[in-house]
Image: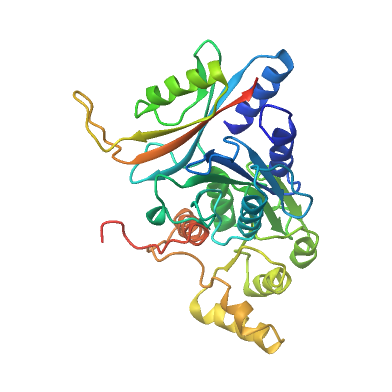
Amino acid sequence: MTAEIFAEIREAISQGEPRVLATVANTRGSTPRKSGAVMLLRPDGTFMGTIGGGCGESEVWQDAMDTMADGIPRLTVVDLTEPIDGDDKICGGVMEIFVERVVD
Amino acid sequence: MNFSKKTIVLDAIENAIAGGESIVIATLISSGQLNHLTLGAKILVPKSSEVNGSFGDQKVDELVISAARELHDSQPRINVGTAYLNAEKQLHFRIGKSTNSDAEIMFQLWEQPLRLIVVGGGHVGLAVATLGDFLGFSVTVIDDRDDFANRDRFPMADEVRCGNVGVEIDALQIDNTSHFVLVSRGHLQDELALRTALGKGAGYIGMIGSKRRTKTVIDHLSEEGYSSDELAGVSTPIGLSIGAETPEEIALSVMAEIIMLRRGAFGERLSS
């Protein structure tokens, strides 16, 4: 997956298109993906790779879209320890995800 | 340095994965109270060549570079870690000691995938190579019999070497990402392989055999002048105690031991 993401970043650089990379920087407790997992976001909101299925991915996606727009890196904290209605939150940990624009 | 400016970061990572110089990349992922630092800035610390990049504070850069250099030699291997930097500019890796006002630095170590060198292409060697490949290791197989050291038998291997095991091991570039699994057809072969593999800085050397048989080999090498420290680092008999009987189960036991050591764990039941 890493190789495919790097290839897409290179392609985006040559096309002059922006991309945002989200990297799991650290985790505590039980989380869907471990540190180093990556997700690459495109300007149309589609992405490749995953930082963790349904568990917190939408929060990261929103931050990544903001970073796509303003270029400011963000550190998103996804807390999976608090249950939300209708969601079993089987994960139960906390992860920090660093979001950065890798192509302007 | 900023990821977006150039392809330097990408070039360095891809070079490292391809077997070039390994690199630690430190990224400022949160500035905390240290507002003068550049959020998102990166410092590239290759294993031996020149450092590139800055967070915008010389003292902080020095701390980060020194921590990155330690990661290059870390055992067990840490591929991604977060460090915390307090207002007094002290850097540490303990989340329990961190506060919300600390700056956070993500360290990523990029290097060639872990390498598994299987000496002996028999039933156990085949199972170890198969499982090692499945686990993401780059697999090299060595045997002096061409019926065993060939591509048809080992399609999953990155490299198959047929020849005297001592000569073939000597021809390899070994570092602490290299893991030797000695499972050859007899103790003379294993002894030759062990003698050649020792002292090259491998991350792991394991040798199959009963307690009695492996002790004989270790005693020989001890008489030849290998230090007891060096010999004590050899995992023999090889593997974790899971009651393995078949070649496939032995492979599982061996790979479990390698992963356990690499991650600095202890092999107990999680439920115990």
Q: Position of residue A62 (x, y in %)?
A: 43, 20
Along the line of sight, the residue nearer the viewer: A71 or A9: A71
Q: Position of residue B140 (x, y in %)?
A: 68, 52
Q: Position of residue A23 (x, y in %)?
A: 51, 34
Toward which corner of the image does residue B202 lie, by quadrant?
bottom right
* Left or right for B79, reference B172: left
* Left or right for A39, reference B140: left
Along the line of sight, the residue nearer the viewer: B96 or B129: B96
Q: Is residue B135 visible?
A: no
Say if B186 sits above or below B6 in the image. Answer: below
Q: Position of residue B221 (x, y in %)?
A: 67, 83
Toward which corner of the image does residue B190 lie, by quadrant?
bottom right
Image quarter hosting the C terminus of chain B: bottom left
Residue at the extreme left = A85
Residue at the extreme top = A44
- The colour scheme applied to this rendered structure is rainbow
Image quarter hosting the N terminus of chain B: top right
Residue at 70% x, 52% y: name it.
B149
Residue at 49% x, 78% y: name it.
B211
Q: Is residue B142 visible?
A: yes
Along the line of sight, the residue nearer the viewer: B245 or B52: B52
User: How many numbered badges does the structure rendering display?
Assistant: 0
Residue at 27% x, 38% y: name it.
A81
Residue at 45% x, 31% y: name it.
A51
Say if A91 sits above or below A64 in the image. Answer: below
* Left or right for A5, reference A96: right
